[in-house]
């Protein structure tokens, strides 16, 4: 059994989610995909990283992420830090010849992510961008319905990714609100997932036309503080998209969407059928086929079941709820399979680069108020 020694950079929300996924992937998929070894974790503060190492089960810890890059024992660098650090950290890891798993959005500019994708190819290492919704069994099912022609010619994609996590104006400023740390607001944080899933199902976006708004222009520097800091990026972003396959799309996203908790939802309308899906009801896909019309017509619910790609590893029967963390397990399994068996995978840095190209075009369009072509 091949050991894969992991160096995790960033022990926050995603650092924990990744570690949980590695542990469970090993248990669910078996030793032939490698045995993750939690070798070293890095974070900025000693007390934080020490506690994280103990809780997550890492052998060692450091407050200098370059220790992980320079450590010959480490095979895989796992980057779960704020967006502005991805490029620098992933580049250093690739130059050191490590496999790299990096959270989304990959980079701030298409030029940076292209450089990383090219470098990864040159080094011949596995390069995986964290876009777990691509591995959601429900989205894979929808992809197959489209591919098999069950929905006919796809005419329209209508999508929303809304949360209200940042609705409270008293909630303090974070790295997510400041462009030099985040690159964009709800667009990169939330809509990047919808861009990934839609491009997985429908192919690439050709051009976009966007509008954006900041709803809460300043936030306290700390909870309860009267000192305020400026919010620099989109609370809301909405854009129209023309896909290369001729489909027309509208994608909206908000991080201040009152009442919406994790409303990743979309409808795809084709000439022969339609589907509707929402992550708030993760185990259910609504489908409509024209051929069912007449007395029994209308949307009906398909409950996820072991026939759907990835589901069966968790549950042997239909209709049992799977979760966000399970999508991460499926993602990490793809990553381990690529490292240990050379298995193909979709979400490489070239895929991350394509998402960055769409984000860049949307930002340009929101600024210029013009249709903007997505760079090839
Ligand atoms: N795939 C998803 O669904 C998903 C969900 C949430 C966040 N994310 C992405 O994951 C990344 C991290 O987000 P998060 O929510 O986990 O953030 P977080 O703030 O919870 O965690 C980030 C961690 O990185 C640490 N860090 C910052 N600078 C560092 C440095 N120089 N060296 C080492 N550690 C450093 C922070 O101290 C913190 O512990 C972001 O890019 C975000 O877009 C993805």
Image: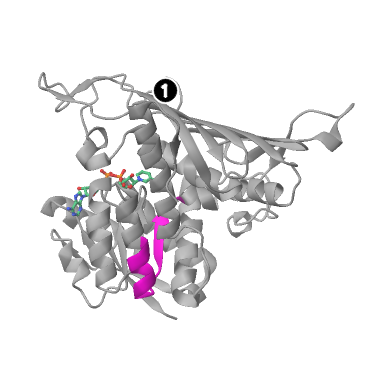
Could you say where residue 277 lies in the image, as x and y percent from the top left?
A: 61, 36
Q: Residue 322 appears at what percent x and percent y?
A: 56, 46
- The colouring scheme, among rainbow, by chain, secondary structure or one colour, is one colour
Q: In the rendered view, would you say 7 is above or below 304? A: below
Residue sitting nearer the eye, 50 or 228: 228
Residue 118 part of the magenta segment: yes
Residue at disc 1, CB closer than 8 Å to ligand 1: no
Q: Callout 1: helix, strand or loop? A: loop
Q: Residue at x 32, y 73 (%)?
A: 75
Give the side of residue 331 with respect to residue 58, left or right.
Answer: right
Q: Residue at image x 40%, y 69%?
A: 126
> Which residues are drawn in magenta?
117-131
Q: Is residue 318 left or right of residue 281?
A: right
Q: Is residue 34 above or below residue 157?
A: below
Question: Hey, which residue is sitting farthest right in the picture?
Answer: 295
- Residue at image position (61%, 51%) is 140
Residue assigned mark 1: 257
Of residues 302 and 56, the one drawn nearer to the viewer in this rendering: 302
Quadrant occupied by the N terminus? bottom left
Residue at left offset 11%, top offset 18%: 226
Query: Could you tell whether 29 is left or right of 130 in the image?
Result: right
Seen in the picture, residue 312 relative to 37 is either above or below; the reply is above
Residue 254: x and y, percent? 40, 27
Q: Is residue 45 above or below residue 301?
A: below
Residue 227: x and y in percent read: 10, 21
Q: Nearer the viewer, residue 189 or 245?
A: 245
């Amino acid at each position: 059994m091949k050991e894969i020694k992991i160096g995790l950079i960033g022990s926050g929300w995603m650092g924990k989610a990744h570690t949980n996924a590695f542990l469970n992937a090993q248990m669910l998929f078996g030793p032939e995909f490698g045995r993750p070894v939690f070798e070293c974790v890095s974070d900025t503060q000693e007390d934080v990283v020490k506690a994280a190492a103990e809780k997550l089960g890492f052998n060692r810890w450091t407050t200098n992420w370059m220790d992980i890059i320079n450590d010959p024992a480490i095979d895989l660098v796992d980057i779960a830090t704020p967006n502005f650090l991805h490029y620098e950290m992933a580049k250093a890891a690739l130059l050191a010849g490590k496999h790299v798993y990096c959270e989304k959005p990959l980079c701030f500019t298409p030029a940076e992510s292209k450089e990383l994708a090219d470098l990864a190819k040159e080094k011949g290492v596995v390069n995986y961008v964290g876009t777990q919704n691509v591995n959601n069994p429900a989205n894979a099912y929808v992809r197959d319905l489209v591919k098999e022609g069950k929905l006919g010619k796809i005419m329209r994609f209508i999508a929303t990714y809304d949360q209200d996590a940042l609705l409270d104006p008293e909630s303090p400023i974070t790295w997510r609100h400041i462009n030099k740390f985040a690159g964009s607001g709800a667009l990169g944080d939330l809509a990047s997932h919808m861009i990934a899933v839609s491009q997985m199902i429908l192919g690439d976006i050709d051009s976009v036309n966007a509008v954006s708004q900041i709803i809460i222009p300043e936030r306290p520097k700390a909870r309860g503080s009267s000192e305020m800091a400026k919010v620099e990026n989109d609370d809301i972003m909405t854009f129209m998209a023309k896909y290369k396959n001729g489909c027309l799309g509208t994608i909206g996203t908000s991080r201040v969407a009152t009442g919406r908790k994790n409303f990743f939802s979309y409808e795809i309308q084709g000439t022969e059928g339609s589907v509707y899906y929402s992550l708030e009801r993760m185990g259910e896909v609504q489908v409509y086929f024209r051929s069912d019309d007449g007395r029994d017509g209308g949307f009906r619910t398909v409950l996820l079941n072991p026939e759907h790609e990835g589901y069966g590893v968790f549950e042997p029967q239909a209709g049992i709820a799977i979760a966000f963390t399970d999508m991460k397990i499926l993602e990490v399994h793809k990553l381990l399979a690529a490292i240990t068996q050379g298995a193909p995978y979709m979400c490489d840095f070239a895929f991350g680069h394509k998402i960055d190209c769409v984000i860049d075009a949307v930002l340009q369009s929101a600024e210029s108020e013009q249709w903007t072509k997505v760079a090839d």
